[in-house]
Image (cartoon, helix red, strand yellow):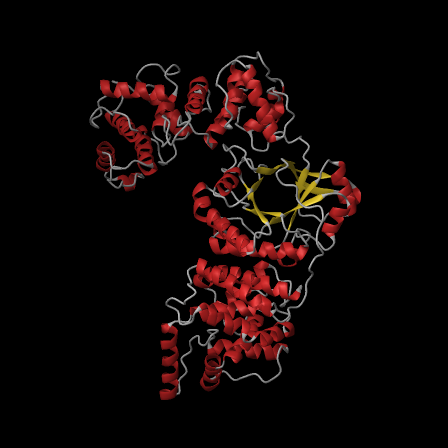
Amino acid sequence: MADAMVLKAQQFINSTYDKGAKLGISRLVEDGETGWTVMFALTRALQYELGIAGLSDNFGPGTLSTLQSKYPRIGASGVPANIIRIVQAGLYCKGYDGGGEIDGKYNDRVRDAVIQLKKDMGVDFAYPGSDVVPKVFKGLLNMDPYVTVNNGSAQIRAVQQWMNGEFVHRRDFYIISCDGHHSRTVAQAMLYAVQYTIGMADGVANGVFGPGTQAGLKEHTLSVGSSGTWVQLFTAGMLLNQRSVSFGGTFTAAHADAVRSFQSFVKLPVTGKGDFSTWASLLVSYGDQNRKGSACDGVTRITPDRAKALKAEGITYVGRYLTNPIPGGGKVPEKEIQPGELQTIADQGLRCFPIYQTFGRGADDFSYPLGRAAGQAAINAALDHGFKPGTRIFFAVDFDAYDYEVTDNVLPHFKGIEDAMRDDGDRYGVGVYGPRNVCTRVSDAGHASASFVSDMSSGFSGNFGYPLPENWAYDQIVTKTVGSGSGSINIDVNIASGRDTGQGSFNKPRGVLADTSLDPDLVQAMMTDVGKYMESIGFPNDGGVRKWQHWKCFTTTVVDYDSDITLYAYRYKMRKALIQTSAYWEMRHVDAVDESADLAVITAYETTGTFKDTSTGICQIFGITATRAWNHAVSKGYVTGSAKDINDDTLYGMWRKCRDDDQFALSIVPLIHLWNADGAPGSGNDETTLRPMRLDYTENEVYEVLRRYQGTNDEAKAHAKKRLALYQVMEKYNAIARNP
């Protein structure tokens, strides 16, 4: 919302620093809305007035020290008018009274506003009076609020104000927001506060939960009757972790009860005391890393000797991966559950909880279509390995997702997973693996029933400053090696809450089998599932603006030629779903523009003998693509016959057959896949060679084959992510058919 005084602040910057671009101060949009852009401009203006070379958005130590040396107290006299104008502008942008104008006059209204600002910050006793001191100036020129916002907690605000007032005179402690919400900055401030209270000097205290901090905490166990700053810090930590306690300097019986509740929740020994392990769980996400966990996860096969080593360590639950997206396993060849491994786990009295992860290292790996693909791929893989219905699969978000990325990418992704599970009959449950904020938000949205928390990544913005999710099942705290000799194994140690217990017995693995003919009893269910997925990404079953309705495309590309597709798949060691997916997807996309393009090709050839290529037929194949794929298949011995010359007549003949003969077009689809799998030699755009076509292609290889069918541009990449989900739906029913 536009504010008249913020507008004046923007106009002040633009008019005073009209050569701002040369100075390093960008011209502001004069819209009356505050924000970081305005605060950065004010910071740069201050640096300019201080004579600092190389202006920066950051109000860092250099700016602070220069301000301290030149103007340690900014008040009514002795300070350049423009610096006072910057103070006034900052006050307006923070919602305080800047004196009525931006005139460089430090009048009574400015003084009152500064006094109120200090009081809101909690530093009115540390910095009495109405002058602006450097650390207050730094706090003025940012977007931190000093009053509660968005239903902030009054008690947490009291903690924030107390820390500001108590520690602001320490060199590396800066004024934090007082908005009533926990955050990364507040969590960092808590660590500094603990270190200062331990007695660490400036320059030694660093906000890191290191050996010195841990040693100091071990000397300050609290119990009923304890009092002083340590109790204030401890109760602050409890409040920041959303535990209902009163903030104060005396450890009461009520505090002990709250501590017992917290200890029970995080699975610590229930003592009611503020011991080291409890301090650690309050201050850092991973807590006390010397704790023994009853669960673990890892990328190494569980052998009988390793299972014995895990049991000796007190491990009961083992997390293992359903798939490995890297062809051949890459540097972690045992990441995926290995043949016979689940039986070993069961025989040794352990239990396994499955984890599904492809790459998941950035927001671009998460979307609704990719969630649908992940959900169905995980179902297929879980069935392949023999996991029984009722198993919960934990889907990984293995990156530091910012809150907006959770909203824009991660939540739609998990909605896709949820929809895939529902369409499968909910035979498996959904869990989420990731930072605390991701787990909480996905679970609160109803997309996951339990959380596997990546608390070991304590620096993640989604962990630092967030409480442990209420539905946590596994809490990942440290990496270590256990066992020796043939039993040695590197694991991530997890604390288990008991909300998930994995599985202790398994069905027989399905194995890697060739595809068979589609069971007629599966056709209707398969057509329904494919239609549901396509509708979910914007393709109505009635065809919409496209030429063909869903039933027609499905019948033509999946049912009518099932015997041919089954033969091609067997002959080329290829999954039927690769052929079905490409053919169905392309047929669903045929529209009036494609038909007009076809007529233009026919007219040009019949009138001039010139062939002007375009994609055609139900499988939308270019004449040159069909010809080169055929020639490649001949050269490789995939088919018998002769290579074709590349000329207009040949290309038009191939193009015409792809347009007019559905059976022929479908026969070319697997040849295009083989050509692309081999790097599409002769295409003029050779690509990295995949492994030779095989039945156990990884999801990454499947994606690449599907993507290459369409091309190399951004549209092809975007469509391939959607087609990957379609592939998994097709593969679901093909897998059922080949595993009766």
Question: Which quadrant is home to the C terminus?
Answer: bottom right
Left or right, 120 with reference to 474: left
Q: Where is residue 550 in the image (x, y as percent from the top left)?
A: 46, 68
Instruction: Please say if 215 is above or below 538.
Output: above
Q: Is residue 279 visible?
A: no
- Give the residue drawn at x 39%, y 30%: 151
Q: Position of residue 601 (x, y in %)?
A: 39, 81
For the image, the number of numbered tags is: 0
- Residue 179 or 206: which is nearer the viewer? 179
- Residue 184 or 432: which is nearer the viewer? 432
Most extreme residue toward the front is: 521
Left or right, 193 with reference to 106: right
Instruction: Please say if 129 is above or below 331.
Output: above
- Residue 51 or 235: which is nearer the viewer? 235
Q: Position of residue 688 (x, y in %)?
A: 56, 64
Choose top left, top right, bottom left or bottom right for residue 59: top left
Question: Which quadrant is home to the N terminus?
Answer: top left
- Give the residue drawn at x 56%, y 30%: 284
Instruction: Please say if 379 is above or below 474.
Output: below
Q: Is residue 356 visible?
A: yes
- Residue 572 or 561: which is nearer the viewer? 561
Left or right, 340 with reference to 545: right
Q: Position of residue 298 (x, y in %)?
A: 66, 45
Instruction: Please say if 687 is above or below 421.
Output: below
